[in-house]
Image: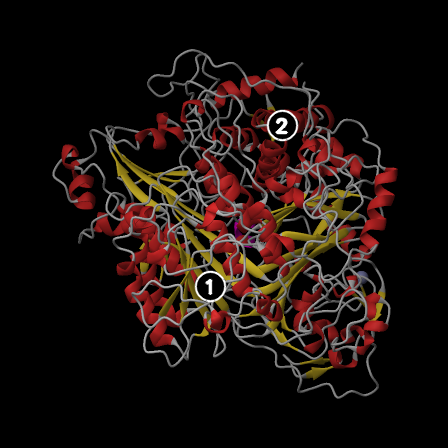
Amino acid sequence: MSTAGFNSQNGTGTGQTYTNGPSQNPVALQQPPGVGYGMNHQPAYNPMQTKVLGPPSPALYASGPYQPVPPGPQLGSYPPPPAQPLLTRPPIGVLPSHTPPQSASPGPGPRQAQATPPAQATPPPPAVTSTSYYTGPPAWQYAAPRGPAPNHVNPAAAAPPHMSHGSAQPPGPGAPPTSIHGYPQPGTAPPPMNPPPPHTYQPNRPAYGPPPTAPPAGPPGATGTPPPPKVDAQSWGAASSARPPTEPDTQEGDVECPGDVAGNGPQAPNSYNHVDNRMAGAAQPGPPGRHLGHYPSLPPGYQNTLAPPPSSLHPALQAATQPYIQGPQPYQQQPGGPGPDQLSPSMAAMSLQSGTPEALRVVNLLQERNLLPPAPVPAPTPCLTQDLQKLNCSPEVFRCTLTSIPQTQSLLNKAKLPLGLLLHPFKDLSQLPVVTSSTIVRCRSCRTYINPFVSFLDQRRWKCNLCYRVNDVPEEFMYNPVSRSYGEPHKRPEVQNATIEFIAPSEYMLRPPQPAVYLFVLDVSHNAVETGYLSVFCQSLLDNINALPGDSRTKVGFITFDSTIHFYNLQEGLSQPQMLIVSDIEDIFLPTPDSLLVNLNECKELVQDLLKSLPNLFEKTMETQSALGSALQAAFKLLSPTGGRMSVFQTQLPNLGVGALQSREDPNQRASAKDVQHLSPATDFYKKLALDCSGQQVAVDLFLLSAQYCDLASLGCISRFSAGSVYYYPSYHHQHNPAQVERFQRDLKRYLTRKIGFEAVMRIRCTKGLSIHTFHGNFFVRSTDLLSLPNVNPDAGFAVQMSIEENLDDMQVVSFQAALLYTSSKGERRIRVHTMCLPVVSSLSDVFAGADVQAVTGLLACMAVDRSVTSSLSDARDAMTNAAIDSLSSYRQSALTIQQPGLLAPACLRLFPLYILALLKQKAFRTGTSTRLDERVFAMYQLKYQPLAFAMLMIHPALYRLDDLSDEGALNINERTIPQPRVLQLSVEKLSREGAFLMDAGLVMYLWIGRNCHQNFLSQVLGVSSYAAVPEKLCLLPELDTAESQRTRALVSWLRDQRPFFPSLHIIRDESQLKPHFMQNMIEDRTESALSYYEFLLHLQQQISK
Ligand SMILES: [Zn+2]
């Protein structure tokens, strides 16, 4: 077997864990250890760091504190706008006159009179970059973290950190237990994005016979046996990069308070640094990484390749389909709570006494080929008592790679599976209990929110399930607003719901919650106008302007740019919008700072006028240059005083001014290069600006619409570090690419109208003994477990890696809690809390039995993205292969009691090799196939940012046969019948020329029509008379009044409805240009450059038996 492994990501059991931080984003990974964001002067220790990244280079912000432009007042330091000569492009409205800023660079002048390009003069450094990030907090800023906080509302701040909030105060004598509780309020969430999975089972197919002696037929052209993947000795650990900069966090107890978010002061020693130092000192590299987390166990019966009884719902499926958090549950918690005494017997019964659980049934992968369940793979159900499981967090929100937590790090190391959490914390929920309370009950020691898994020692005391401190029950908590009864604290909604939202009292805010502020930054260069996106955008915003989340305070603003920056004065009272052009892009300033972001309600007509005229305004432009960097700087200045959301639309490589980029892609190298270059950013400009934005509560969402290379690896940093999102529409064109246009329209509608949280932070806590490191997703890591999220949206996923620092010997269960504090678009401060409880196990078999194969795959994908950037793509590929080899090898050596030939896996891991092979063939990681660099980088972003369910579709698409759809086993939703065809293996063996097959790959769907497709399908579904009559570029299913058409459209739209983005549909024939894309997803087949599934299994077996 191989000597390499993925293990070290879990730490080595010697206590070094925190590799957290910037490593969540590939860019950060580029930084050598010790170079953080300048907030930490200590070299960051990274136990996983096995690859040398080169000598430390100067930190971005290391020596001089970097500062964002302070809000408000500082604008005054720019040349006073009133005196400036008007930068004017005449079209819209009257132009005020302006005086150019007093700088050496050419002042802004009338656009027409611009004689010399602004870039010619030597401009002074842009104001933004010369300022410091860590100025003292503006008076309005939240939380008053470093040093005295004059406007901290809570005088208790002087108390020890953990007690600084009033919410944990002991119950006051005789406080009336009453009316403050507004519970329950209806959740504000929109209808569920994900209806429950189908309740249908279809019998699995019988296993294939003995393995074929020849490899399965590959697609035409597949010749020669590709070499097996190279397996180098290496460990996952190397993927981790420097730990994130930690920031002073003097209010760790209040962590979710926004004030902790931005760097507000000079770097002071803080508790986290001490922890780090200690750990760095103690850290031993340990045995070269070889521990991985665990695998999810598929629920009993699920993994069974025998047909499950059609009548009974699989337990996992039952869990997944349970109505989500249906308000208070009838569960009666004993005063003792779920203590060890109560848990052990039943758990033992569940996991051990019932014989070998299905999850551990031994599967010989070389013999059983039909491993895919007929319906999407459900999340495994943790092995908990029914009472606890009933209260547990939904797997759609919170998932762990191992649903049974190993008792020790060494046990985890043995399993060779990664331990980590996958979260979808702001997911749209149909049922969300909301509590209004003046007292939010939290542990006085670790600040955990009271939750269903705490123990009540008696009516007056509860024991924290994370740190075990015994806390008092506040008087108010004795009253149950649901039952309107007194003296039953364990029946409170907080103790009955693993997901709950609080409306935060005033302690959680130090300035009034910010209003919803939306700034749109639009590329209007010639290239942009050519794509035709601008009119789609303007129309979409016009259509949805009343649905933008917000209230009477909502503000909007617009900036357009090409080689110059254009602002729009929308002040109430103007008869029409007024355009102001700033051509001095080297020293950007705001011409009329007070009238560029306006109240939407008061100025709606002007905004609508602008949206109607914008597309025409630039219709004839010949300006080809793009000063994106300056436009972003201008937008940042505009949003700094309030925070908010910046939506940037870009259609080409920025080529002028700050942040200008050059093409780095060599199309000739796309397929041949073993290692892909330029996955990391070419400049740190976008990352630095993103950090500035994060510090001022500004998130940047990037919409990239382009046919050419745009260096997404560099541009994407602006969103990754500011907690924004990246949308990518390659080859967007309003006429030539209708599928992309439809996708863009649908995505925009969702984007503009979906829920949004502002000035958010998320803290993840776990039971003492476990520790969190290495985060994945889009955000800035503010301290070891605190993520700064200037915006949070319902479609964002996150992942974290964990290790076991102290033995969990005496624990039956452990818990994880994610708390997301945000400002709603209505200006309410809210806290959404999710708590998950999992059992602790002491045997390797139990660890394997609890493995969640999809969660493991999702986490490994995130780790592999990091590895690709910090090390190389080939390293990442080897590490993924080794993950499969190592875990199966460990299973064979340590968990199997009866040795037998073959490639053996526990049933819960039977899909692991297939998923690993799928990852190797995924756009993000594949080699030997021409893959555009931007598309590869985008796929990497998606793997790190998408919630698990969607990431899995990208990794292993679902294939269905559509020409024989029936109503058997169909779902019935809102009187619509949704057929549920079974999921097929991704192999051409499963295709038939007589059929039609739908492949759902997440962002895109393909409907492949066989050459001899039944006439019935062609006419009843596609409305054509023959195969030859299927149009070449068809991306819409015609709405025919036939049962076949209705069934097909119902299925496609149901699949689309379950995700927050809009997958385009391509109907293809054998001759279609897109056929290779369809075929590339046939993961089980061999291609010229990649192994078939069977060959891959043989390779694994070879390595394991070495
Ligand atoms: Zn606690």
The residue located at (40%, 63%) in the rendering is: 87
Is 318 contained in the magenta span? yes
Res 308 seen here? no
Mark 1 neighbour density, 10 Å: few (under 14) some (14–19) many (20 or more): many
Residue 1092 is situated, as x and y percent measured from the top left of the image, at 46, 21
The local secondary structure at tag 1 comes to: strand
Q: Relative to 684, is 608 on the left or the right?
A: left
- In this view, the residue in front, 137 or 655, is 655
Relative to 550, is 905 above or below? above
How far across and how far down the image is residue 293, in percent?
69, 37
Please state which of the two labelled residues, at mark 2 or mark 1, is closer to the viewer: 1
Q: Position of residue 278 (x, y in %)?
A: 87, 44
Q: Which residues are magenta?
A: 315-319
Q: Is residue 397 left or right of residue 151?
A: left
Looking at this view, name the residue that lies furthest to the left: 1025
Question: Foreground: 48 or 469?
Answer: 48
Location of the C terminus by quadrant is top right
Q: Residue 519 got which mark?
A: 1
Rendered view: 968 above or below 748: above
Residue 1049 highlighted magenta (yes or no): no
**Badge 1 residue CB within 8 Å of ligand 1:** no
Q: Which residue is mark 2?
A: 879
Whole-percent x and y of residue 761? Answer: 65, 61
Mark 2 → mark 1, Cα distance in angstroms: 42 Å
Image quadrant in which the N terminus is located: top right
Which residue does the image show at 43% across and 20% down from the upper left?
A: 1086
Residue flagged by tag 2: what amino acid is it? Ala
Q: Main secondary structure of the magenta part?
A: helix
State whether residue 508 is above or below residue 949.
Answer: below
Q: Earlier in the sequence, mark 2 or mark 1?
A: 1
The quarter holding residue 12 reads top right
* Badge 1 amino acid: Leu
